[in-house]
Amino acid sequence: MPMVSLDLDHVHITVSDREASADWYERVLGLRRDARVPHWASDPTQPLFIGSGRSRSCIALFQRRPDDPPRAGDHTVGFAVSGADFLAFAARLDALSLTHRDGEPLTRANTVDHGAAWSFHFLDPDGNRIELTSYDHEMIAAALTA
């Protein structure tokens, strides 16, 4: 039986330092600590939730333990933004000093045209893959070629 209503609640990400990671996500993507479960945020064995505040979906930052095995596969977390926000992010790339998923600095040259959307692919400080995507394709194409 199909679900009648299904919304993404959260995605787990393991990090070396929950507070430092929360600060990085706020500085780079504007995500803030979510106050729904403050007793979890104060317990290092529980998740620290961060989100945009515009939706219920969020990221649950879990403290990585030294004995955690490495993870294999693609564990990209994708965020959708407006065309204007995508271009504003592109304009801030030099100041953000982000790392492309190939290990090199992220630049405007790393913008990916998917035909229906534009994306940037980069890493957080713990090597988690992040994708910033906008479906305002024509607007961004016009701005990038201007």
Image: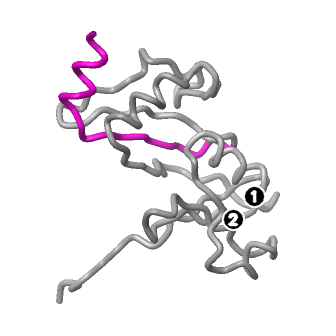
Corner quadrant of residue 137: top left
Q: Residue at the location (68% across, 71% down)?
A: 47
Q: Is residue 107 above or below residue 28?
A: above
Q: Answer left or right for 108 relative to 45.
A: left
Corner quadrant of residue 27: top right
Quadrant placement of the C terminus: top left
Task: Report how far apart the C-alphas of labels 1 and 2 lie in the structure.
Answer: 7 Å
Q: Which label belongs to residue 62?
A: 2
Corner quadrant of residue 54: bottom left
Q: Residue at the location (69% across, 65% down)?
A: 62
Residue 44 image offset from top left, x and y in percent = 81, 70
Amino acid, disc 2: Phe
Q: Is residue 138 above or below residue 82?
A: above
Q: Secondary structure at mark 2?
A: strand
Dot 1 alpha-carbon crowd within 10 angstroms: few under 14, some 14 to 19, many 20 or more:
many
Q: Which label belongs to residue 18?
A: 1
Q: Is residue 88 above or below residue 37?
A: above
Amino acid, disc 1: Arg
- The answer to whether residue 10 is magenta is no
Give the residues in magenta: 126-146
Q: Answer left or right for 60 relative to 118.
A: right
Q: Residue at the location (44% across, 41% down)?
A: 131
